[in-house]
Amino acid sequence: MVTAVLVSWKRKANMPAIIGALRAQTVPVEVWVINNDGFNDFGADRLVAIPWNAGEWVKYIFAARVETEYCWIQDDDILIGDNYFLEDALAIHADKCPDHILGTAGRGLQYKSPYYWPDIVDRDGYANIIKGHSMLFKSELVRQARIPRHPSASDIVWSLDTGNGQPVHYVSKKLSRRMEALNQYGVGYEFRPEHIRERETVCQDWLSERTHALA
């Protein structure tokens, strides 16, 4: 069984379709919704209602409380495109990265600028960083790392922590092609042109912190 942890804020109109797609999977899925903008549970199994925008990082707090073997995290601007998606994702995870994170897009990490590079989207491959818009991992993994409290790049910190900075997470092009884009309602990363520089800085800071810790 898989627990899906979803965060809702400005894109609540997308939630019924997202949850409907999760309910239709060939593997059992328990759905948790963290609602940063009200008390609507959208038909989820569990609701965490927060009366302000607590940010994306709160999903890791509640992922640490998941009791099923696997946890699935996805953003509220994408849709699983078919009923066999999670079944296939579980098989790919077991084969390619059973102790780490499976995703549909990722990045490498370099030890000199640019740190947040290269992009791994249109091919299969191992990555240092899995982009947080879709992640599958064993639930025990999230309990082995710190909660990555960053307002918009928590996925970088958590990927690097759980992989010790190494390219051990896996990006699946097969799965990426089976997801559909939904309306972003003006709050996607492309509406924030500074986000690449911000993510570059987070990678640099993580490397600096690790260097100091090992000194």
Image (cartoon, helix red, strand yellow):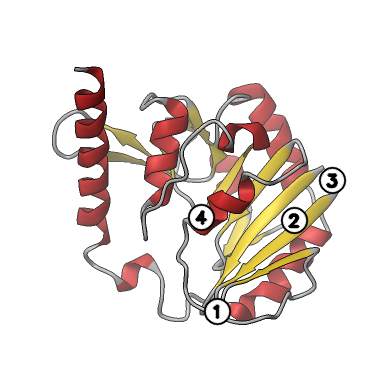
Instruction: Identify which residue, 100 or 56, lies in the foreground.
Output: 56
Q: Which residue is mark 2?
A: 82
Q: Which mark is residue 67?
A: none
- Circle 1: element type: loop
Q: Position of residue 37 (x, y in %)?
A: 56, 80
Seen as rendered, the residue at the extreme top is: 215
Write down the residue under mark 4: 133
Task: Report, in whole angstroms, how far the alpha carbon at label 2 lies from the one at label 1.
Answer: 33 Å
The mark nearer the N terminus, 3 or 1, is: 3
**Which residue has dot 3 on it?**
27
Q: Earlier in the sequence, mark 2 or mark 1?
A: 1
Q: Is residue 208 above or below residue 179?
A: above
Report which residue position mark 1 lands on: 51
Residue 48 vertical position relative to residue 211 in the rendered view, above or below: below
Q: Amino acid at mark 2?
A: Asp
Residue 133 on image: x %, y %: 51, 55
Q: Residue at x 77, y 67 (%)?
A: 44
Quadrant of image for the N terminus: top right
Query: Spatial distance from mark 2 to mark 3, Cα to Cα?
Result: 12 Å
Callout 1 crowding tier (Cα within 10 Å): few <14, some 14–19, many ≥20: few
| Sequence-first tag of 4 and 2 | 2
Circles 4 and 3: CB distance less than 8 Å?
A: no
Say which of 101 and 50 sits in front: 50
Name the element at disc 4: loop
Badges 2 and 3: C-beta atoms under 8 Å apart? no
Dot 2, crowdedness within 10 Å: few (<14), some or many (≥20)? Answer: some
> Which picture quadrant has residue 95?
top right
Q: Earlier in the sequence, mark 4 or mark 3?
A: 3
Question: Of helix, strand and loop, which one carries label 3?
Answer: loop
